[in-house]
Image (cartoon, grey):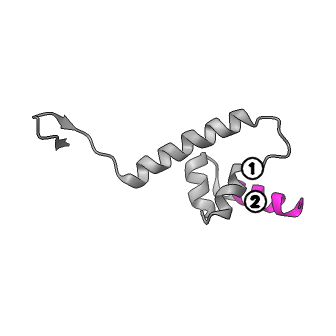
């Protein structure tokens, strides 16, 4: 807890956890909008392209790292 100077305590969250939470919400929104669109790149592929590891992608998508690896592998074979 951190005081805000007005006598009100507030909880601080680590920046990396906050960003992961925001990313997870954006992923969920994107997946809902693109449901059924076979041409859209999978979120796992997009995150891998910007440098996320399979473990990082798994953490924000709620999937297992091996499942992430398979999605990325299959996507690279269909190009």
Residue that appears at 17% across and 36% down? 9
**From the image, which quarter does the N terminus lie in?**
top left
Magenta stretch in the rendered image: 67-79
Q: Residue furthest right?
A: 78
Say left or right for 21 vs 13: right
Instruction: Locate the C terminus and report the quarter of the image it occupies.
Output: bottom right
Left or right? Give the position of 61 relative to 2: right
Left or right: 79 with respect to 60?
A: right
Residue 75 sits inside the magenta stretch: yes
Tell me where residue 64 appears, x and y as whole percent. 64, 52
Q: Which residue is mark 1?
A: 42
Give x and y (percent) for residue 2: 18, 44
- Nearest to viewer (mark 2 / mark 1): 1
Indicate the quadrant where residue 55 lies: bottom right
Instruction: State the predominant SS element of the stretch in magenta.
Output: helix
Q: Which residue is mark 2?
A: 72
Of callouts 2 and 1, which one flags the residue occurring earlier in the amino acid sequence?
A: 1
The crowd level at tag 1 (other Cα within 10 Å; few <14, some 14-19, many 20+) is some
Given residues 71 and 33, the one toward you in this image is: 33
| Residue 7, image x, y percentages | 10, 34
């Amino acid at each position: 807890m951190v005081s805000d100077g007005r006598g009100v305590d507030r909880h601080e969250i680590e920046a990396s956890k906050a960003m992961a939470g925001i990313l997870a919400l954006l992923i969920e929104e994107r997946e809902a909008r693109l449901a059924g669109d076979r041409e859209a790149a999978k979120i796992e592929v997009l995150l891998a392209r910007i440098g996320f590891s399979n473990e990082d992608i798994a953490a924000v998508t709620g999937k297992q790292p091996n499942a992430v690896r398979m999605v990325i592998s299959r996507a690279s074979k269909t190009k």
